Image (tube, helix red, strand yellow):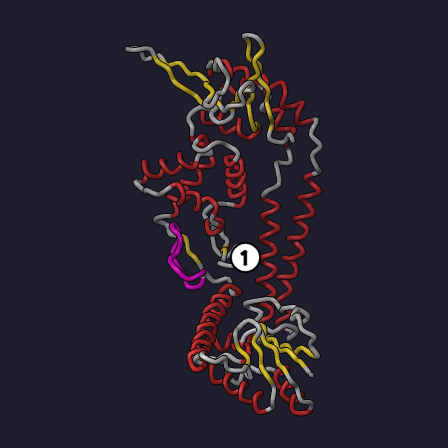
Amino acid sequence: MRIIAYLYTDRLLESSPDPASWGWEIDRVYQDLASLSATSEKLKNNKPETTVETRPQWQQLVQDCQQDPVDYLLVRRLEELGDSMQTVSDRLSQLDQLGVRVIAIEQSYDSHATVIPGTDLRAELVKLLQQIQQNQRSQRIRRGHAHNRIKALPPPGKAPYGYKRGKDRYAVDRATAPVVKDFFEHFLLYGSLRGAVRYLEKKYNKKISVSTGQRWLTSPVYRGDLEYQNGELVPDTHVGIISRDEAAQVDRLLRRNRRLPPRTASAPRSLAGLVGCGECQSPMTVTRVSARGKATEYLYLRPTACTRKPKCRAISYDQILQETIQRICQDLPRAVSGVNLPDMDLVKQGIEGAIAAKQAILEQLPSLTAGGILDPETADLRAYKLRTETAQLQAKLAQLPPMNLKAIAQTVSIPQFWFDLSESERRFYFREFLRQIQLERESDRWHIKLVFIFEP
């Protein structure tokens, strides 16, 4: 008994499957790859398979079946036999005349299956034909999207706020782009998403939800990149509203805010979300107290979920703030010097070298195409893969910590630096270095223990 298999792969939609993954003892596997030039021609003419597409392995399969009889032909899906129902039907008839039994392993199809009593064979065939037509239509749509992706064209749909659709790329909308730019600048200045959302509404009367603001901050579009439905990123496809350095800073702030309790990122007080009680392990919140009829206001830190009896008492906010600044100036330089950080210069140079190597290959593709070594479609596919790999390397580069951490630690270890800052600015710098401030009590005194973000 001879069993063969046939695979047809469109490189725009999927990578070539492993021919040995059938789970059957296969005598031979025939595999055709869709021609990129034929795919482009079909998309341009909006037609199914034509004479511009050849399948040499299919032709070899038929020739071998004529010379040496075959019992079974395995395919994944029937639509791999052709791009139209007529082609699929003709090839099934051709195989039937050769006495070959066709089995689609991902569909309930067997060309010589025994009819089960009580089943409507006609209804089953109609259902299968409808499924094949639906799959072929879906593949044509996906192929069109993939072709646009290879050409780095914008995905279908309305352009994001701040842009308008151009001929082959997004163009900056001068009326709305300043609003987006101001939103990012406010977030970079204060590190508060909710604060940036409120700022847009107050200054521009532009109302957006917090979730929309979150999407703006993480969207590759505003950085000059395109992200497609398959998750792949193509860099530098259009003019970005923010720079690469600003985008890296946004990502750092978002990662930092994820460590904080909800809503504390936009809290007006610099210690909000950082202080915890070392006795009851409860987080502490900032509370305000004012005397009746007086404008004077007092701030306290109070445990939110204390389980002790009697409960841990509130403590003066200003007292903890003063002591926190004092301890940072004493402990931060010592903590930074004791951290075994990798040589960030070498790491950065390695990533930048890999990016430069891929850029060099990209620059060679036009000459390889002009010399006939690569056809234009293959060159486009190779350029697309290089760009997506470059985007991944750029993301790694943006996530690297600052290389001059020790110099920064020396600068912020001056007490006057902290006292010259506003509460919102102080909040920004506290969260750059501190993971938590733990209050530990000894008799009637409180002591502060700082946990820095770079400590285990």
The residue where tag 1 is placed is: 232
Residue at 54 percent of width and 74 percent of height: 77
- Packing grade of label 1 (10 A; few <14, some 14-19, many >=20) is some
Q: Nearer the viewer, residue 310 or 252?
A: 310
* Magenta part, dominant SS: loop
Please provide percent x and percent y for residue 436.
55, 26
Residue 34, quarter of picture: bottom right
Relative side of 93 to 339, left or right: left
Q: Nearer the viewer, residue 213 or 315?
A: 315
Residue 339, quarter of picture: top right
Magenta region? 155-168
**In the picture shown, does residue 309 fall above or below 113?**
above
Residue 422 appears in the rendering: no
Please provide percent x and percent y for residue 276.
52, 23
Residue at the extreme front of the image, as rendered: 117
Identify the element where label 1 is drawn: loop
Residue at the extreme top of the image, as rendered: 444
**In the picture shown, does residue 231 fall above or below 407?**
below
Q: Is residue 314 magenta?
A: no
Q: Amino acid at mark 1?
A: Glu
Residue at 69 percent of width and 76 percent of height: 26
Q: Nearer the viewer, residue 39 or 82?
A: 82
